[in-house]
Every structure is written in structure tokens, then in C-alpha cells.
Image (cartoon, grey):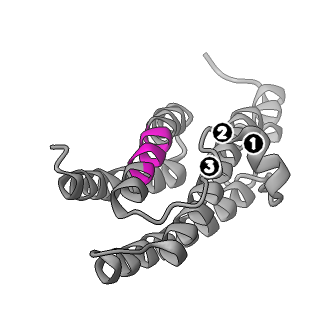
Amino acid sequence: MERTLCEINERMTNLNPIGLDRTEAALLSKQLNALLANYSIFHQNTRGYHWNIRGEKFFELHLKFEELYNDLLLKIDEIAERILTLGHHPTHNYSEYARVATIQESPLITEGPQAVAEILEAFKAIMPMQRALLKQAAEIGDEGTSALMSDYIRAQEKMIWMYSAYLNNI
């Protein structure tokens, strides 16, 4: 069956500049903004662990937490840029992050095992979100978001294993 020129034009007008359905891209952007909120709070919590860690494993954990918060900062930027690529605006204020995020601001934590446990809890919150985004992106043919989520999941699974090994929780 041939499509009429009107049907083709209608379909084309509902596509964003990268060729994705505008409605689907809006839904995906909303989910990415929720992930952005969680990453932003996770990042700030990790900076707090880095700044306030004390004790026997100070040098090891201080460096590890710095490595993690730098990685989270890169991901925050990538997620925000992906939202922009989809044709929407990334949220940038902490009041909105606090309203939307599953991850909560952490209290002052100075003990290594407690900080590592908090990091594992944060990963437990974002991993299902990323898996859902991966599935949603694949369903609408959004290879860019799919690749981003796939890369994050793969790297974070290893990090979860390593932090769990530190706590002897494997």
C-alpha cells in the first residue's frame, strides 16, 4: 500500500531534528531528567564522602571517591547534552533534583564502610532507571541513548562488584 504525500509529511513533521518521534523523545527526556537529578545528588554525596572520610583507609578511599565523583560529573554532562540532543532542556536546579530524585542527600559520613554502602545504595537506585531507559530508547530506535545507557550499565556493574568486594558483600 502506498503512503500518500500527506501521510509522509505528517510523519516527518512529528520527527525531531535527529529523526525521532517528538512525543517519544519528550517522554525519554523526562526520564533522562530524572536520571540527571539522581546523578547530581549522587555526585554531591560522593564529594561529601571524599571530603569527610577519616580513618585507616583514608588514602585509598579519598582517591576512590574522587575518581567516582569525577566520573559522575562526566555522566551528568553527557546526560544533559543527550536531553538537549533530543530537543529538550535539562533540569539544572537542586530544588527540582530533590523533588524528583530517588537518591536522597546523605548526612555527614566519615566512616569508609558506611560511605561505600551509601554508594552501593545509589547504584541500586540508578541501575534500574538506566535499564528502563535502555529498553525505552531501543523501542523508539534511539541508538544514542541506548549506547549511553549500555556503556554506563557495563561500567557500573563492575564498580558495584568492586565496592561490594570492599565490604565483603559478595
Of 7 and 56, the residue lying toward us: 56
For badge 2, the amino acid type reads: Gln
Crowding near pointer 3: few (<14 within 10 Å), some, many (20+)?
A: many
Q: Where is mark 1, residue-wise?
A: 15
Q: Earlier in the sequence, mark 1 or mark 3?
A: 1
From this viewpoint, is residue 89 visible?
no
Check if mark 1's residue and mark 2's residue have beta carbons within 8 Å.
no
- Looking at the rendering, in which quadrant would you find the C terminus? top left
Relative placement, left or right, of 101 versus 53 is right
Q: Secondary structure at mark 3?
A: helix
Q: Where is mark 3, residue-wise?
A: 38
Quadrant of residue 6 within the rendered picture: top right
Crowding near pointer 1: few (<14 within 10 Å), some, many (20+)?
A: some
Closest to the camera, between mark 1 and mark 3, is 3
Q: CA distance from mark 1 to mark 3?
A: 29 Å
Q: Where is mark 2, residue-wise?
A: 31
Residue 5 in the image: above or below residue 134: above
- Looking at the rendering, in which quadrant would you find the N terminus? top right
Residue drawn at x 66%, y 39% is 31
Q: CA distance from mark 1 to mark 2?
A: 19 Å
Quadrant of residue 40 within the rendered picture: bottom right
Q: Secondary structure at mark 2?
A: helix
For badge 3, the amino acid type reads: Asn
Of 166 and 153, the residue lying toward us: 166
Q: Which residues are magenta?
A: 118-127
Q: Any magenta on residue 122? A: yes
Q: CA distance from mark 3 to mark 2?
A: 11 Å
Residue drawn at x 40%, y 63% is 111
Residue extending furthest toward the top: 1
Q: Any magenta on residue 123? A: yes
- Where is residue 19 drawn, in percent x and y? 67, 48
Residue 51 in the image: above or below residue 144: below
